[in-house]
Structures are given as C-alpha cells and as structure tokens.
Image: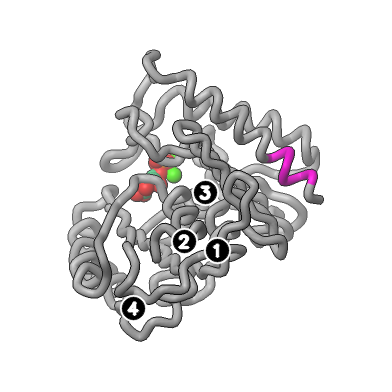
C-alpha cells in the first residue's frame, strides 16, 4: 500500500513539471462561472495527465476533479477507490506567477479520505500522508502546532467568489486578528492545509470550497494531529464542497477560538 502513495507522489511531481514549464508561455486563460474564477489550458492538461497516469496505478479507481466535467460525486463513488484531483489549486497565483500554486491529489477509500499528496512545483515542496501512517513533508515527519491561538498566525481565505462572503470573512478575520499574531490569505486552500500540518500556521478558514480544494490536505492535516470540520465544527461529509475550519491541535482545544458557526449563519441570512 505504501507503494501506492509513492506512485501518486511521482505522478504529482510529473504534473508539477508541466506546471513549472508553463511559465512564460501562453496560458490560455479563460473565465469560468462566477466572480474571479479562471481556468487555463494547463489546468485541463494537468488533470488529463493525472487521470491517465493515476488510472494506471489503480485501474478500478473512479475520478472526481475540478475540470473536464468530473466535478460531481457520482453514485457508487462511496465504494472502492476514488481520486479527487485539483490539477492546479491556486490558479490565480499561477496566472500571476506567484507562489503558492499546487498539484493536489486526494485518494478516498469507501467514501473517506485515505491518502493525500500536495506538490508545490515552484518551491519543490511535497506533502503526503496515508491514513494511520503520519504526514510528511519531503520525506520528513510533520506535526501541527500545539500552541494556542495567541501564539499562532491564522489563514483566512478571501472567499472571492462572493463579495458578501468576502465581507463576512473580513469580520471573522478581524476577530481572529484581535486574538492571534496575524492574518494571511495564501490563495491555495490545499497548500494552506499543509501549512497547518507542518506547524507553520495555526489554522485556516474559508466559507465555501469544492471537494477537490480539501480532499488531499485534510488527510495530511489530520495525520499531522490537526482537525478539519465545517463552520459549525461538525465532521465533513466528503460528498460535496462546503466551508471548512482547519485547526492545529493547540487551537482546536483553545477556548479563545471564535464561534465560526455564527459567521456562517450570518452569511446564510444575508
Ligand atoms: C481556489 C483556491 C483559493 C480559494 C478558492 C479556490 P483554484 O482554487 O483554493 O485559495 O480561495 O476558493 O477556488 O480555483 O485556484 O483551484
Ligand atoms: Ca482549488
Ligand atoms: Ca483548480
């Protein structure tokens, strides 16, 4: 089984090579549905590459991915293996030649995350985990922080898809700011989860994400001792996208942690 994760790591590196070599070329940028939602020809190219390569590792596996019409959890996908792919997470950063942008591959077994690989080609950082086997960054074991909120940096995703959600996120960021050492927004949800897993930051929230935005990072973070829930701090269903609250060990138990559910309720009433 360890071999499967290693093969997925090689596939992620292969995809990362395509992303790295794209800089300076025509990216073929197009608008997708909604606000500030872009796709480049490299998003589709990398997803096609991964479906082909990962299909050779586990021929019976199904696929769910952000591009090419694969974005729904199909009936029957809760049995056996399912790859959940975001070919480039952080496309807007990629377009502007900014870090982070990552290749992200989650592998579900019987409907729940079983392994995850996240590769950042610009910095050659590779994060991976398999259920029950711990989380790793470039082969070294990683652990999430045990420090409380007051001794950590927090990531608040900008929720740029909706100005209303953005405005409520900023209110929540204000409350975090008053209780922690600073707020950042990185532009890649999967990389944000890996930053908590590696102990660099304490937590991350974003009001709405696709399943592919947290499929790999959630298993990496949980194997590093952190937690990933919805805004009401309930377990995720892993059947569709949602808002997420990802926390290191120290903050998950911290009474100073804001009531994120109250902000989600505010958005649902807006
Ligand atoms: C986006 C990134 C970003 C988050 C957006 C996502 P994409 O994914 O993860 O951090 O704020 O909501 O859609 O479009 O770059 O794959
Ligand atoms: Ca994404
Ligand atoms: Ca993407």
Residue 199: which disc? 2
In the picture, the disc for residue 257 is 4
The magenta segment is 3-8
Q: Are marks 2 and 1 in contact (CB under 8 Å)?
A: yes
Image-based side of 86 in relation to 93, left or right: right
Q: Is residue 234 visible?
A: yes
Query: Tag 3 or tag 1, which sits nearer the N-term?
Result: 1
CB of mark 1 within 8 Å of CB of mark 4? no
Nearer to us: label 4 or label 3 = 4
Percent x, y for residue 69?
Answer: 53, 37
User: Which percent across, then down, holds residue 211?
Assistant: 51, 53
Who comes first in sequence, dot 2 or dot 3? 2
In the displayed structure image, the side of residue 244 where residue 74 appears, left or right = right
Residue on which disc 3 sits: 212
Distance Cα–Cα, label 1 vs label 4: 20 Å
Bin the neighbour count of mark 4 within 10 Å (Cα to Cα): few under 14, some 14-19, many 20 and up.
some
């Amino acid at each position: 089984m360890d071999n499967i994760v290693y093969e997925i790591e090689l596939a992620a590196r292969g995809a990362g090579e395509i992303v790295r070599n794209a800089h300076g070329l025509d990216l073929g940028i197009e608008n997708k549905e909604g606000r500030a939602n872009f796709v480049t020809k490299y998003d589709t190219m990398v997803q096609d590459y991964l479906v082909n390569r990962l299909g050779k590792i586990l021929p019976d596996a199904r696929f769910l991915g952000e591009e090419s019409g694969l974005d729904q959890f199909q009936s029957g996908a809760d049995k056996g293996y399912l790859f959940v792919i975001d070919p480039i997470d952080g496309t807007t950063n990629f377009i502007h030649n900014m870090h982070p942008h990552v290749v992200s591959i989650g592998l579900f077994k019987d409907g729940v995350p079983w392994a995850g690989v996240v590769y950042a080609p610009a910095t050659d950082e590779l994060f991976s985990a398999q259920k029950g086997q711990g989380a790793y960054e470039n082969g070294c074991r990683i652990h999430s922080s045990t420090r409380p909120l007051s001794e950590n940096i927090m990531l608040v995703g900008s929720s740029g898809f909706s100005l209303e959600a953005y405005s409520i996120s900023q209110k929540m960021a204000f409350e975090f700011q008053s209780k922690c050492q600073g707020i950042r927004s990185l532009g890649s949800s999967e990389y944000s989860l890996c930053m908590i897993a590696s102990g660099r930051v304490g937590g991350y929230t974003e009001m709405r994400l696709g399943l592919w935005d947290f499929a790999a990072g959630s298993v990496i973070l949980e194997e590093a001792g952190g937690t990933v829930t919805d805004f009401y701090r309930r377990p995720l269903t892993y059947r569709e996208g949602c808002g997420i609250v990802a926390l290191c060990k120290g903050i998950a138990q911290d009474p100073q942690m804001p009531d994120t559910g109250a902000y989600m309720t505010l958005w649902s009433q807006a």
